[in-house]
Amino acid sequence: MHVDHLLRLDSLDLTLVWGDESLLGQEIGGVTATDLEDPTRFLQPGEIVLSGLVWWNPADGPARTERFVSALREAGAAALLAGEETHGEVPRELAEACRRHRIALLAVPAHTSFRAITEAVYLRQWGELSRRPSDLYALPENVRGELERELERGASVGDLLESAFAHLGTPPCHLLTGSGRTIARTATAAELPAQRASESLRGARGAQGTTLRVEADDTAFDAWYLHLANEGQVPPRVLHEIAEVLGRHRRRCDRRTASRRQAGQELAALLDIPHTDTNVVENALSSCGLTDRGGYTVVVASATPEEEGADAGSAAAALAEALSHLPGISFAVGARPGGEALAVIAHDGIAHDTTARGMTAQGGAARDGAEGVDRAALGETWPLVHACRPTSALYAGVSEPVTGPAGLGAAVGQARYALAAAARMAAPRTAHVAAAEDLTSLEALLAGVPDDVREVYRTTVLGPLLRAGRSSNALLLETLEVFLAHNCSWARTAETLHLHVNTVHYRVQRVEALTGRDLSRLDHRLDLRAALLCR
């Protein structure tokens, strides 16, 4: 069990105060509850520490806080879970100390008991002993031998899963990604919708079953999880050994597809170079298995971490995972500088009502695809992927389809513009997908304009109205905004602002004089409206 698993348990209702992906990915080795000012001698590496903060007093200064947090760091604690009941909140001083010493900090609400947290850890991890090196195995020798032979033969993950559970009567079991995508399932397992699967993995209220992460070189977005709908059907040691076999299969698959992932990376880098020769682009598409198609769509995504230090390939993993939910599509994806990822999706023909097309699960290997999928499907999947790391902001921009390799440069520009619009229009730490075709209003169009360009335009057009220190300027700006919002109606503007119509006339005349615009002209109205939207 990892630290971020606790955040996914709705029953605990924990809140992340500070911690990046590497800290949240730490494995939990145990639990210690303490309110000692210096708990060093009672802590073990890998433990999470529960504290009600009884030891903390705002009048004591930072020395006591520094002593407590540095003790956690020296002991190798995985995280601090601080109770809010004593002080009503987690002190900012404690959060700053945890940031300095790189200790993940989670807030525990008053209605969540430390006992509930302890039970959640040990009930999920009571089989961990079986993962230590040992000459004893829980899986029968004949089953282990068969699984080894299947691994060597290159058996599919579905065949491995079926063989692993056959001697137990084949209980219903799903192999899922963190976003709820089913990679494989036993013959007795019913189809599990991604939304419900995602909720089960996050420990949503009412969710049942047993979940175990398959250890591999992955990210929060593309990790694998074994999920059994019914608890107690499989001994924990057996489940861990099966997970270990699946982890070996995952690592082998990753090695086999490394060249295809590299091809996707090279294609994404190539499309970042302006005026690249079309023949060079065609060769890169061929390396990704994306040639001889009627059209292409580009998707650009960003996965911005709450804190620094997150994996630079997170955006690529998130984008590949999201598009892997869409059936029957072909794609290549690569990471780009600045936490961005770029994907090229190949599809048959161009239909302007189908702007999302396909990709593979492991980030670059292309599959045969047929007709594309409506972009709404990508929009529905995007929040599920975001739930894998909810402390991030996850945005995507989708281009219009283009007819061939020569149009990919323009498609990249469209997708990046839509991405900028998505990031500006969405709330912080949320997930949002925007497409070029969504830019149907002046506000949406301006949302994709770079910040520095927006600022230059705003200050140039509004000019003296932005000068600080003059209260009258603020009144003029307010009047201008209301006047434009009411289609330049003097009466409705006066009514909204509780002013006499003559006062509105005077203020509008002052705005016109200061900006050099004539509000009786439509083009000048649009200029000022655009400048207001650039704030």
Image (tube, rainbow, N blue to C red):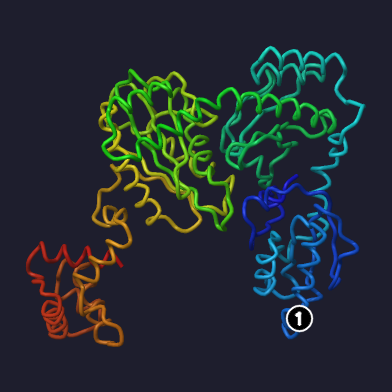
Q: Is residue 106 visible?
A: no
In this view of the protein, which residue sits in the foreground, 272 or 292? 272
Residue in view at x 80 percent, y 62 percent: 74
Between 166 and 220, which is closer to the camera in this rendering? Answer: 220
Q: Which residue is at a point 71% across and 34% down the rendered structure image?
A: 214
Name the residue tied to disc 1: 57
From the viewer's perspective, is residue 532 above or below residue 313? below
Q: Secondary structure at mark 1?
A: loop
Residue 415 image position (x, y, % from top left): 34, 42
Q: Where does the image place residue 97, in percent across and percent down from the top left?
A: 69, 70
State left or right for residue 492 relative to residue 131: left
In percent of the image, x 82 and y 49: which residue is there? 29
The three-letter amino acid code for the residue at tag 1 is Asn
Residue 416 appears at what percent x and percent y?
Answer: 34, 46
Q: Is residue 147 visible?
A: yes
> What is the quadrant of the N terminus in the image?
top right
Numbered circles on residues, count: 1
- Is 489 drawn above or below residue 258 in the view shown? below
Res. 201 image quadrant: top right
Horizontal relation, residue 143 to residue 454: left or right: right
